[in-house]
Amino acid sequence: MKYFTIKKVASENPQGFTFDIRCMRMVRSGKVAAYKATQDSIGNEGLTRVLVHAMLHDGIVGGWLNAQGEMQYDSCRLFTDLDECLQFGREQEQLAIYDLDTETQYDL
């Protein structure tokens, strides 16, 4: 069920989305950083890996179309504090984090 819901959300939001699989709804507020463990998760196999990780961690899945036009997924963590999110992003060796409230990407 979660798999097909995320596939539908991804097709409706190719420029990017953040989705909470615990309550099955879009996340519209907060700061988002991805886990390194699910980096470069592309296509159906990548989504499966991300869903397993998200279910065992924070329940947040993000996705966007990458430069090659492929849907890329991440298991993510949601923050209210920008500094904590930036720190987590650095620890996870991410290139950037995203602030949903201000629609701002912060490069790391």
Image (cartoon, helix red, strand yellow):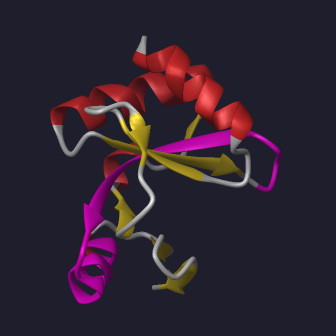
Q: State the image coordinates of residue 40 (x, y, percent, origin top left).
A: 54, 46
* Region of the chain picked out in magenta, as a range: 67-90
Q: Tell me the residue at 72%/32% (across/down).
A: 11
Tag count in the figure? 0
**Left or right of 53: which side holds 9?**
right
Q: State the image coordinates of residue 82 (x, y, percent, origin top left).
A: 30, 85
Residue found farthest to the top: 1
Q: Is residue 65 above or below residue 24?
A: below
Where on the picture, by quarter, is residue 59? top left
Magenta residue check for 69: yes
Where on the picture, by quarter, is residue 105? bottom right
Image quadrant where one finds the C terminus: bottom left
Q: State the image coordinates of residue 74 (x, y, percent, origin top left).
A: 45, 46
Residue found farthest to the left: 56
**Left or right of 18: which side holds 24?**
left
Q: Tell me the residue at 41%/52% (across/down).
A: 27
Q: Is residue 51 above or below residue 101?
A: above
Image quadrant where one finds the N terminus: top left
